[in-house]
Image (cartoon, rainbow, N blue to C red):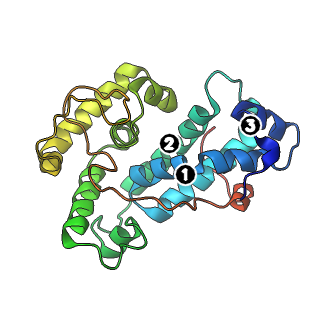
C-alpha cells in the first residue's frame, strides 16, 4: 500500500481515532507503518514463516476490531506489539501440545533466509540459522518472547515489559533464565564479544550473555512484504 500523503504528520493515536470514527483508510496506514516490525517479532518468536504470518494477521484483525477500546495509556506501537506477542504465544503454546516438523527441516530453514540467498547460502550460514532456531525452540514461549524483544529486536527492558504487560523484573527474570539455558548452545556464535557493552543502537541491554541479535547471528532478514492490508479484514483471533 502506498503512503497516503494526506496522513503526513498524523500521529498513530490520531489515525486510530479516525479509524474508530469511520475513516476507511486510517487503519491501513497504521498497518503500513508497523507491520514490518510486528512481522520481525512474530517470525523470530515462532521460527516459522507461515505461523508468523498467521499470528500477525490474527493480531491485526484483533487490533482492527478492538480499536475502540484503546485508551492511550501506552503508545499505539506498544499496544500493537502486545497483541502480536499474545497471538504468537497462543500459537507457540498450541504448537507445544502437538507434534511438529523438526526445527531443522531444510525447507523451513530456507524460508527464513533472504530470498536471494536461499539457493546459494554457504553451509556455515545454514548451520548458523539451524543452531539459532533449534536453541530458541528449547525455551518456554514466554522466555522466547522476552529474548526476541530485548536481545534480537533491541527493545529496552522497560519497553519490553510494556509490550508483554508484565513488570520489568519479570522480563529480566525470563531473559536471565532463557540466556542461562541458551548459553551452552549459542556462546560460540559470538566469539570475542563483550556482552556487557551496549548494542550499536545505543539501547541498553542487561548485563550477562545475550542472545545474538538478528545482525550478529546473521538472523533471517525479513521480507518487506508483511500481511497484506486486505488481510486485516479477514480471519480473527488474538487478544486485544
Is disc 1 surrounded by few (<14), some (14 to 19) or many (20+) residues within 10 Å? Answer: some
Which disc number belongs to residue 85? 2
Element type at mark 2: helix
| Marker count (numbered) | 3
Q: Quadrant of the N terminus?
A: bottom right
Residue 102 in the image, given as x and y percentages of width and height:
29, 67
Q: Residue at x 36, y 30 (%)?
A: 202
Of pointers 3 and 2, the one earlier in the residue sequence: 3
User: Rounded to the nearest whole Å, what is the CA distance between mark 3 and mark 2?
Assistant: 17 Å
Residue 83 vs residue 114: left or right?
Answer: right
Residue 90 in the image, given as x and y percentages of width and height:
49, 47
Which disc number belongs to residue 214? none
Dots 3 and 1: beta carbons under 8 Å?
A: no
Of pointers 3 and 1, the one earlier in the residue sequence: 1
Q: Nearer the viewer, mark 3 or mark 1?
A: 1
Asked which quadrant contains residue 155, the reply is top left
Residue 89 in the image, given as x and y percentages of width and height:
46, 45
Q: Residue at x 66, y 51 (%)?
A: 32
Residue indicated by mark 3:
67
Element type at mark 1: helix
Residue 91 in the image, given as x and y percentages of width and height:
47, 52
Nearer the observer, 147 or 166: 147
> Is residue 229 depicted above or below 152 in this figure?
below
Is disc 2 surrounded by few (<14), some (14 to 19) or many (20+) residues within 10 Å? Answer: many
Asked which quadrant contains residue 26, the reply is top right
> Is residue 180 depicted above or below 48 in this figure?
above
Amino acid at each position: 500500500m502506498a503512503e497516503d500523503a494526506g496522513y503526513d504528520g498524523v500521529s498513530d493515536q490520531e489515525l486510530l481515532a479516525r479509524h474508530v470514527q469511520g475513516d476507511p483508510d486510517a487503519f491501513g496506514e497504521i498497518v503500513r507503518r508497523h507491520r514490518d516490525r510486528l512481522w520481525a517479532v512474530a517470525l523470530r518468536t515462532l521460527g516459522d514463516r507461515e505461523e508468523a504470518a498467521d499470528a500477525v494477521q490474527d493480531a491485526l484483525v484483533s487490533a482492527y476490531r478492538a480499536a475502540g477500546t484503546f485508551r492511550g495509556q501506552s503508545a499505539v506501537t506498544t499496544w500493537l506489539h502486545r497483541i502480536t506477542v499474545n497471538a504468537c504465544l497462543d500459537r507457540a503454546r498450541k504448537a507445544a501440545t502437538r507434534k511438529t516438523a523438526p526445527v531443522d527441516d531444510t525447507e523451513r530453514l530456507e524460508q527464513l533466509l533472504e530470498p536471494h540467498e536461499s539457493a546459494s547460502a554457504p553451509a556455515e550460514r545454514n548451520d548458523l540459522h539451524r543452531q539459532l532456531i533449534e536453541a530458541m525452540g528449547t525455551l518456554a514461549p514466554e522466555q522466547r518472547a522476552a529474548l526476541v524483544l530485548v536481545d534480537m529486536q533491541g527493545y529496552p527492558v522497560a519497553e519490553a515489559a510494556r509490550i508483554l504487560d508484565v513488570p520489568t523484573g519479570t522480563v529480566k527474570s525470563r531473559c536471565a533464565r532463557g540466556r542461562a539455558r541458551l548459553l551452552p548452545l549459542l556462546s560460540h556464535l559470538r566469539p570475542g564479544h563483550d556482552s556487557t557493552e551496549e548494542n550499536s543502537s545505543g539501547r541498553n541491554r542487561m548485563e550477562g550473555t545475550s542472545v545474538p541479535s538478528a545482525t550478529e547471528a546473521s538472523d533471517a532478514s525479513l521480507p518487506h512484504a508483511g500481511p497484506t492490508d486486505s488481510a486485516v479484514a479477514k480471519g480473527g483471533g488474538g487478544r486485544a
